[in-house]
Amino acid sequence: MIIKREREIDFTNKKLVALTFDDGPNLTITPLILDKLETHGAIATFFLNGKYINDKTKEIMERQLKLGCELANHSWNHLDMKTLNKDEIKREVQKTNEIIYDKVGIEPAFFRPPYISVNDEMYDVIELPFINGINCNDWEPNFTAKERTEIILKKIKDGDIVLLHDFEGNDNTVNALDDIIEGLVEEEYNFVTVSQLFKYKNIDPNIKKKLWSNVNIIK
Ligand SMILES: [Zn+2]
């Protein structure tokens, strides 16, 4: 099922940031993240693990799309893919693309490697652009919501991708999100999906062996 999005604003020459969340979808933290995004009229890109996608979490994915969020690929099993052979790497990505398409009719356009662990085999086999991001250690339980917020607001610059997590139990990121979003709005950032970020910055993401954190920096 494809849900029609509202007409897009033109973000050319604006300050842009792409919030992203990894390791969902789930029925506990993902809906709370979506509540926060909806309250602030913000959007994000969710990098999904295929193993969590089922008829229950499908409803979460439909809500993500309805809010204008993007769905992307974070592998099936969340393994360190450097330990896999080429066939296994391919299967991790293909199976996840297939189940996302099967549930909501979307073909993911981006891949984020689990643990940001990459090697040449992965770049050879996986055809999607690889996405990293600036982070605030939000997978570490002892980083408070306040610390997470401060790190992001300190690091942020135009064209950044922000790497966060909506895995189960990650309440500190839910609790940080109001302040992160409000802080970014105060700095006149606009929230876009990863696809929109490349589109409005007029950058082609299809560069081999490139792990993107900011679309303005091309090396
Ligand atoms: Zn992950």
Image (cartoon, helix red, strand yellow):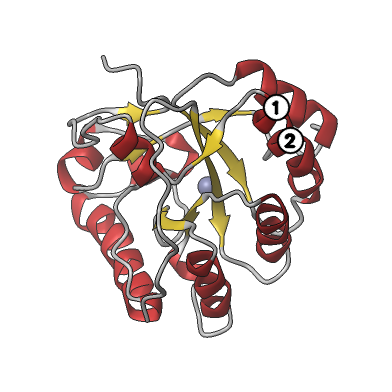
Q: Does residue 188 appear to the left or right of 175 in the view shown?
A: left
Residue drawn at (36%, 74%) of the image? 99
Q: Quadrant of residue 57?
A: bottom right
Of 48 and 177, nearer the camera is 177
Residue 144 visible in this rendered orientation of the protein: no
Residue drawn at (36%, 76%) of the image? 2
Quadrant where the image shows the N terminus: bottom left
**Contact (Cβ within 8 Å) of mark 1 with mark 2:** yes
- Mark number displayed over residue 186: 1
The Cα atoms of the two marked residues, 1 and 2, are separated by 6 Å
Q: Does residue 116 appear to the left or right of 199 in the view shown?
A: right
Q: Does residue 151 appear to the left or right of 72 in the view shown?
A: right
The residue that mark 2 highlights is 182
User: Where residue 84 appears, x then y in whole percent?
Assistant: 31, 49
SS class, disc 2? helix
Query: Please, is residue 218 above or below residue 72 in the view?
Result: above
Task: Give the residue type that dot 1 points to.
Answer: Glu
Task: Give the residue type that dot 2 points to.
Answer: Glu
Of 12 and 215, nearer the camera is 12
Q: Quadrant of residue 132?
A: top left
Query: Please, is residue 155 above or below residue 25 in the view?
Result: above
Quadrant where the image shows the C terminus: top left
Q: Does residue 136 appear to the left or right of 91 in the view shown?
A: right
Residue drawn at (23%, 56%) of the image? 90
User: Where residue 174 appears, x then y in whole percent?
Assistant: 76, 49
Query: Please, is residue 24 above or below residue 201 in the view?
Result: below
User: Where residue 159 appears, x then y in whole percent?
Assistant: 44, 26
User: Where residue 109 appears, x then y in whole percent?
Assistant: 29, 52
SS class, disc 1? helix
Residue drawn at (73%, 43%) of the image? 177
Residue 123 visible in this rendered orientation of the protein: yes
